Amino acid sequence: MDLEYSPEYQRFRDEVRAFLADEVERIPKRGLSETERPGPAEIAWQRTLIDRGYASRTIPRVYGGHGGEADPLKSAIVSEEFAAAKAPSGFGGSGASMLAPTLLEHGSEEQKRRYIPPALTGEEVWCQGYSEPGSGSDLASLQTAAVEDGDDFVVNGQKIWTSAAHLAHMMFALVRTEPDAPKHEGISYLLIPMDAAGLEVRPLTTMTGEALFNEVFFTDVRVPRSNVVGARGEGWRIGNTTLRHERNMLGSASYTEALMTRLQRLLDSETSDGIPAMGRPVFRDRFVKLQARAWTMKYHAMRLLTCTLRGESPGVAGLVVKLQGCQLNHDIAALAIDAMGELGPLYYGSRYERSHGAWQREHMLSLGLIIGGGTAQIQKNIIAERGLGMPREPKPAAPAGGV
């Protein structure tokens, strides 16, 4: 296996490094946040990245992207170098990473021109309306209804665990438009303005102390019929396109690699009785095991990259990324907290906290992501059934007497 980059790609890496060095004063202190909308500095940075081809590289210019050719190797280099420089590598999240590629595949020309450009720059923040109180793992059983009324749909129902709904301008949601159709065939993919009359957002405070998730209630919310993506009843198929992009976003190998770099610095600097944590066998042994998993994940990402370059389907290899990545990130943060000893759990402005509580937040947030975006158990079922061709999990027997 040849893991060396050709001179062309090494020159591109040098170009990216030079850009980051030259722009160090302009790099925003934060990326796209789940507690604030992007400000002028973040939006200007995003536009610069798009102009250079470091973000939205393959999205056509007419839709606000860079308009470049697909080059997975260059995309990988950008991810690696921005992670190493601890620089925001462009907005991800629901709008740029999930909605935009979905609209490119399924949206109308009008929808692409209207919604993709502001999603890429961060000027229009999006959220995802999928889960409901009674429809999480069995998403296709969702009950939020959209009933046709003239040129509009009238939406009633509830969504839950909606990330960034309190910040969002728009939501892409799965709603039931064909109540008499089989459950997978009666769903439509609808774009909903968050300022519509009858729509209410209630924040849910998580164990990080932040309100990142929300409940969203719809009471006679009117949405134009033109906001349906694709055809009515195609929402399940289109929604799965979005979920595929979400899993790829949550299982980023470059993010995990950057996390490992931070962990190594912590273990080298955190001391007890004058001995660095890395100098203690129990911590060093755990670090090496995590490092092996991180390298495995990195080289697995290269395997997927090879499939992309060859135009091949990765098959089951593409299904394990989210499952492995979220668990590994959680385990990395756990070692960081343990290495800080009795100070590790401190959070929220304590004079003794480390890194402004970043490791504690990562530990709790990554635990949530093991559940969010498809629980680990659901991911294992998908891998077994769709990837390995194993029999489907048997459904529970109906209760005696039909009760």
Image (tube, rainbow, N blue to C red):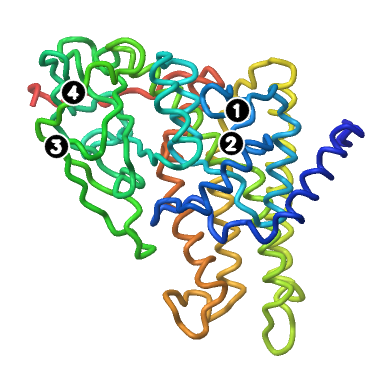
Q: Secondary structure at mark 2?
A: helix
Mark 3 touches mark 1? (CB < 8 Å): no
Residue 318 numbered tag? 1
- Nearest to the eye among marks 3 and 4: give it: 3
Residue at x 71% of width, y 37% of height? 76
Residue beneath label 4, please? 398
Q: Amino acid at mark 3?
A: Ala
| Above or below 244: residue 210 | below
| Structural distance between the alpha carbons of marks 3 and 2 | 39 Å
Give me the C-alpha separation between circle 3 and circle 4: 41 Å
Distance CA(mark 3)–CA(mark 1): 41 Å
135 displayed left or right of 46:
left
Give neighbour class at mark 4: few <14, some 14-19, many 20+ (Cα, 10 Å).
few
Q: Quadrant of residue 200?
A: top left
Q: Going by the image, does 392 lie left or right of 279? A: left
**Badge 3 density bin: few <14, some 14–19, many ≥20, Cα 10 Å:** few
Mark 2 lies on residue:
321
Q: Mark 3 touching mark 2, by CB under 8 A?
A: no
Quarter of the figure that contains the C terminus: top left
Tell me the residue that label 3 is attached to: 197
